Image (tube, rainbow, N blue to C red):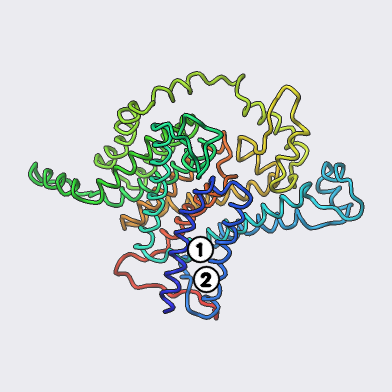
Amino acid sequence: MLNRLESGLFALYLAILVWVPLPFASNRPWGAGLMVLLLSVVMFLWLLLFAAGRVQLSRAAWRQMRLPFTLLALVQLWLLLQCIPLPRVVIEALSPQAYAWHIQQGWLTLSLDVAATRFYLLQGCALTAGFFLTTALVNSQSRLRLLLQILVFSGTFQAAYGAFMVLSGVEYGFFVEKYAGQGVATGTFVNRNHLAGYLVMCLSAGIGLLLSQLSVHRPANWKHRLEGWLRMLMSPKIRLRIYLAVMVIALVLTRSRMGNIAFFAALSITGLLYMRASGHFSPRIMAFLGSLILVDTLILGRWFGFDKLVQRIEQTRPETEGRLWSNAYTWDYLERFPLTGSGGGSFYGIFPNFQPSDLRGFYDHAHNDYLEFAVELGIPATIVLMLVVLLTARQAFQVLVKRRAPVLKGTAFAVLMTAVWGGLHSTADFNLQIPANALTFVTILALAAVAGSLQSVGAKPSHGLSAQD
């Protein structure tokens, strides 16, 4: 019965991963609030089972996830501090600009929009819980494989739905007619760039999964090679390969410049890191990674408008890019709040104070995740978040070097590719401000700890931490 309860929590968590991207990527107050509620319920139930001694967290998993999890928790504590009223002299010392802009009397807060920061804190706690739950619930290679499959399923659905909307001319998002992004793939997202980011993360999971299924043995002769091809055509690998092709086609149809550039760059960089960690050149793996670029993009993508994407990239001019100009003025914003930030979630209300009259439009986010985290949380907290990504990427690379289980190495590839993509795409967009993408991102990053701690099949399991420890 208890095993069923724990398995039920895992199933519920997988369902949340599929659900969160559906309602406009949960980028609405009610959608983000529902995500917070669902993750809170799963976390609470897991803690109840843990307190009763019915579930455990392996010591190996805790060692792997302890530092990045602690850093994430510290950022949430910082957000809490931004919301707490402090003496005026403290605010004046830490954030002179916040002190100057406050209009109320008495104790003040570091955040200039306390309501927004509180909601931002709730979402941050939910994402931190998601990081923890991934490590706690994905406690076997079969579950690890299933989670990757679920991400592939969700990404393929978004890709197929978005492509169908574009090719059929039926422009609908999440049960409503699209009011933005007509003519490009957006899936159930609003912004094509955010769908592109989500697809790249799901592609990372799928590529890692397929890599874990590739045979590393070279066929002895043409007969064995032919038998291998026939087995592949009749195996689940060919279906997975088709799913990847569908996602690449939809990625092209988003016409997202940085989304596509970041995908190709992340795939190439991670492929080189994979070869470096393996210590030898594998023609089979290079052929597979190369096919993603040559076959999926240059051949299939050409049928679905790859030339239009290339044309859009070629026509990009810095002087006409509003996002670049807005980021330039965001640097002025950062100069006023370098240490403490203006408060999580406050960008939309503070940026107009730095927006010149000739920069038209309403900017609810900076088109740069690094800048937005810095102006809202402060530079120190932003560095802490960057350390989380770097630590998990380092863990993933160590898995590639030290572990031999194919699914663990494939998972490490997915983590590394996601980390590289995030580092690149975040320079030109705000994917990590979107709840669905942020949850998927931290979930994949947490898999580095999972891949580094799981026992090989047949190995003696390690003792776990219990509530009594």
Circles 2 and 1: CB distance less than 8 Å? yes
Q: Secondary structure at mark 2?
A: helix
Q: Position of residue 442 (x, y in %)?
A: 52, 53
- Image quarter in which the C terminus is found: bottom right
In primary-sequence order, the first of circles 2 and 1 is: 2
So how many labels did they put on this image? 2
Residue 267 vertical placement versus 151 (above, below): above
Q: Position of residue 314 (x, y in %)?
A: 48, 19
Q: Is residue 9 left or right of residue 295?
A: right
Query: For the residue marked with disc 2, what is the amino acid?
Result: Trp
The disc at residue 133 is 1
Task: For marks 2 and 1, give the CA distance.
Answer: 8 Å
Q: Secondary structure at mark 1?
A: helix
Q: Please tell me how crowded label 2 is: few (under 14), some (14-19), or many (20+) other residues with Cα within 10 Å.
A: many
Q: Residue at x 29, y 38 (%)?
A: 286
Q: Is residue 109 left or right of residue 410?
A: right
Which residue is identified by label 2?
A: 46
Q: Residue at x 72, y 50 (%)?
A: 116
